[in-house]
Image (cartoon, grey):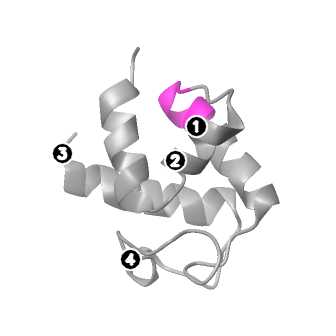
Amino acid sequence: MDKATLKEQLKSQIIQFLNLTDLTTVDIKDDEPLFGDGLGLDSIDSLELIVLLKKEYGISIKDPREGRKILVDVNTMVDYIREHQGK
């Protein structure tokens, strides 16, 4: 899957997993922070994103520090998925 397609798929999954029904994939910018001033997600949402990565991509994140490095924005998540999927 190419990077652009994966980004769109991931945005759709974020909306679905986090029940962000008032957003569309266009509303989520690739480089917008997912937490804080960006998309405004919280710590519960981060757990849901970790579940999403495990369920949809077979990627386990066990170390919270690693999670903080991965769950920065859509670009960072996509790069991590492409690098680690299937490992």
- Secondary structure, mark 2, is helix
Tell me whether the residue at label 1 lies in contact with that at label 2, contact meaning CB atoms closer than 8 angstroms: yes
Dot 2 or dot 4, earlier in sequence: 4
Q: Tell which tag, 4 or 1, sits nearer the viewer.
A: 1
Tell me whether the residue at label 3 lies in contact with that at label 4, contact meaning CB atoms closer than 8 angstroms: no
Q: Mark 1 points at which residue?
A: 66
Tell me whether the residue at label 3 lies in contact with that at label 2, contact meaning CB atoms closer than 8 angstroms: no
Q: Mark 3 points at which residue?
A: 2
- Image coords of residue 68 (percent x, y): 60, 49
Q: Which amino acid does label 2 sit on?
A: Lys
Which residue sits at x=81%, y=57%? Answer: 44
Q: Which residue lies furthest to the right in this view?
A: 44
- State the CA–CA distance, disc 1 to disc 3: 24 Å
The answer to whether any part of residue 52 appears in the image is no
Instruction: Please report the bounds of the magenta region as a residue range.
Output: 52-59
Q: Taking 48 as reference, is 86 left or right? A: left
Which residue sits at x=43%, y=49%? Answer: 77
